[in-house]
Image (cartoon, grey):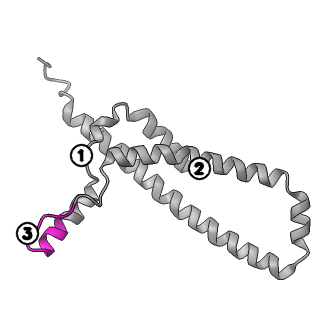
Amino acid sequence: MEQYFSATHRMEQEVMFPSLLRGVFPQQQQQQQQQQQQQQHGAAPEADGHADLYERYQRLKAIKPMVEKGLASVNDHNGSSSDEDAAWAEGGSEDERLEQRLCHHLAGLQQVLTHLTRDTNALTRRYSQILEQISPSEGQPSW
C-alpha cells in the first residue's frame, strides 16, 4: 500500500504537463500492437481499445482518492466495531469462511495495488523520457 502511495505521489510531483502524454501509448502496448500487426499480415491494429498515457494518468489520479477513502473507512470501521466482532466470534465455521474471504479479498487488493503501482511507475518513467526528448541538451545553446 505504501509503495502505491509513494508511486502516485512521485507521479503527481513529476508530471507537471499531463497534456504531453496525449497520444502516447505505453511501450509494452506498442510491442503488442506490432505483434498483432505481424500476426494479421500487415493489418493495422485497433487503437480504440487502448488508452493513451494521458487517459491512464487521469484514471490513476482519480483512483488515488478512492483508495485513500476506502482505507480510511476500513480504519474507521475497525475502530468502532468491537460489538460486531464479538457477535461474529460466536460462530466458528462462519469465522473460518470470513477469514478465507478476507484473505481472498486482500490478495486481490494486493494484486490490484501492485498493478496500479507498476502502471504509475511506468507512466512516470515514460513522462521523464518524453521530457528528455523535447528538452535541449545541456551543452547546446537553445536558440
Label 3 near label 1: C-beta < 8 Å? no
Any mark on residue 67, and which?
A: 2
User: Of 100 and 83, which appears nearest the observer?
Assistant: 83
Counting from the top left corner in percent of width and height, residue 89 is at: 88, 71
Q: Which residues are magenta?
A: 34-46
User: What residue is shown with label 1?
Assistant: 23
Mark 2 is on which residue type?
Val
**Among numbered discs 2 and 1, the one appearing first in the sequence:** 1
* 120 inside magenta stretch: no
Query: How busy is the neighbourhood of tag 1: few (under 14 within 10 Å), some, or many (20 plus)?
Result: few
Query: How busy is the neighbourhood of tag 3: few (under 14 within 10 Å), some, or many (20 plus)?
Result: few
Q: Helix, strand or loop at disc 3?
A: loop
Any mark on residue 103, and which?
A: none
Label 1, label 3: how many angstroms apart (C-alpha)?
22 Å
**Among numbered discs 2 and 3, the one appearing first in the sequence:** 3
Choose top left, top right, bottom left or bottom right for residue 108.
bottom right
For the point 53% across and 45% down, the residue is: 64
Any mark on residue 42, and which?
A: 3
Where 75 sits versus 106, above or below?
above
